[in-house]
Amino acid sequence: MQKNKILQIAGLFAVIILALLISFAPLFKSNEFLNKYLPLIKNINLGLDLRGGVHVVIEAKGPPEEITPEKMKQLRAVIERRVDQFGVSEPVIQQQGSRRLIVELAGIKNPEEAVRNIVKVANLEFKTEDGKTVITGADLKDARETKDPASNQVKVDLTFTPMGARKFAEVTAANVNKTIGIYLDERLLQNPVVKEAIPSGRAEISGYETLEEAHNIAILLRSGALPVKVGIEEMRTVGPSLGADSLNKSQQAGLMGIIAILFFMLMYYRLPGTVAVFALIIYAIIVTLVFWGLKATMTLPGIAAFLLSLGMAVDTNIIIFERFKEELRTGKSLRAAIDAGFKRGFAAVFDAQVTTLIAAVVLYFFGTGSIRGFALTLGIGILVSLFTAVTMTRWLLHLVVGSGLFKNLKYYGT
């Protein structure tokens, strides 16, 4: 019996130490062990409003009959490929209405240039001297920027698809000693003279001053041409300093709220309140793990949803603890009161959490942008809080009671 109590106490302290270690991991950035094994919080992606970046509303131009759902789907796919090629982490690209796309790019250094490259049509054409288009971007398989080490010339190497290679071989064979113009968005890039047939399925575009310029053109060619012309309807830039300021203020407000909640729980519920505090720490750890695992992006609305779900987890504990105290007043033992309190309180807790979860699901599927982020965080928080506030808190309370160190009912706020 004594051995079981020792094991229970050891288990309780192990949970407490692990919870504190992970919770305060960001404060020990110089510690190699913690940096290696507990880097979760600092590795969560931050959204546009916290990290800085650009918010753009792109609208497809043309008659209504030309802007079909299929064209919008193609437009979104091309823009997604371009954004991926530019190396933007966790971009937000979503359709708004029948002809608009919202693009949010967080953490980019030159947002204006990135947006210009994203909205270029990038329609590549090879034209013969009579103006006939014989090769298009659809015939391309790949495009890569290179630099000739001998001549120091920057160029873009083109590789055609098997069908495109056959077409290019036929066109060059039929136009020996003639020029074939290479156009991008109807602008002549170069007009080389064909000396002989080219069956290799490769070509090049030269004349670039820097590798970066050639790199941007190669990205546009690899990602494909936009199916329709587009215009920028709105462009809003959020500076990194403004994002950092928003994050700092959110952290301060959240910390103050959490401290107030924890103080109330400790003063009013005493030992169960202390248990609830550690259950909340475990709650925060699990939510962080889920976000890290899903590679989710944290935004200001997401932080608000996290704090809201934290408050709901506290509310769950309060409902159960009140039932627990009522059971103690009827003369039940501590273990019996714990089981009865959790059993009586669970129905009310479950109903409240499920109704909120339904609202979060509706917001996620019918909302856009930050609303979806709020709903996702709230939904994750609700599911996790049901586990920590019910299962984890109950287990910890049984662990405390089983230790035999806290038999006096004053420890339980009665």
Image: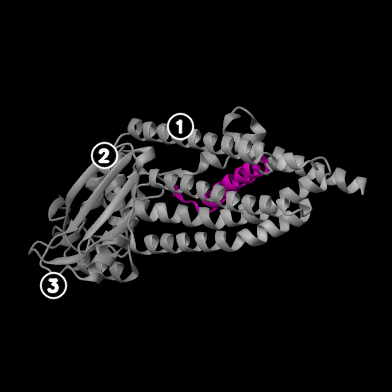
Q: Is mark 2 on a helix, strand or loop?
A: strand
> What segment carries the magenta color?
273-297
Q: What element carries label 3?
A: loop
Q: Position of residue 27 (x, y in %)?
A: 58, 29
Q: Is the image coloured rainbow, by chain, by secondary structure, or in one colour?
A: one colour
Residue 128 figure quarter: bottom left
Specify which label sits upstream in the sequence, 1 or 3.
Answer: 3
Q: Mark 2 points at which residue?
A: 237
- 163 or 84, nearer to the observer: 84
- 98 or 130, nearer to the observer: 98
Q: Which mark is residue 65?
A: 3
Specify which label sits upstream in the sequence, 2 or 1.
Answer: 2
Q: Where is residue 46 in the image (x, y as percent from the top left)?
A: 43, 42
Q: Name the residue under label 1.
A: 252
- Residue 206, above or below 164: above
Res 206 seen here: no
Q: How crowded is mark 2: few (under 14 residues within 10 Å), some or many (20 or more)?
A: some
Q: Mark 3 vs mark 2: give the one in front.
A: 2
Mark 2 touches mark 1? (CB < 8 Å)? no
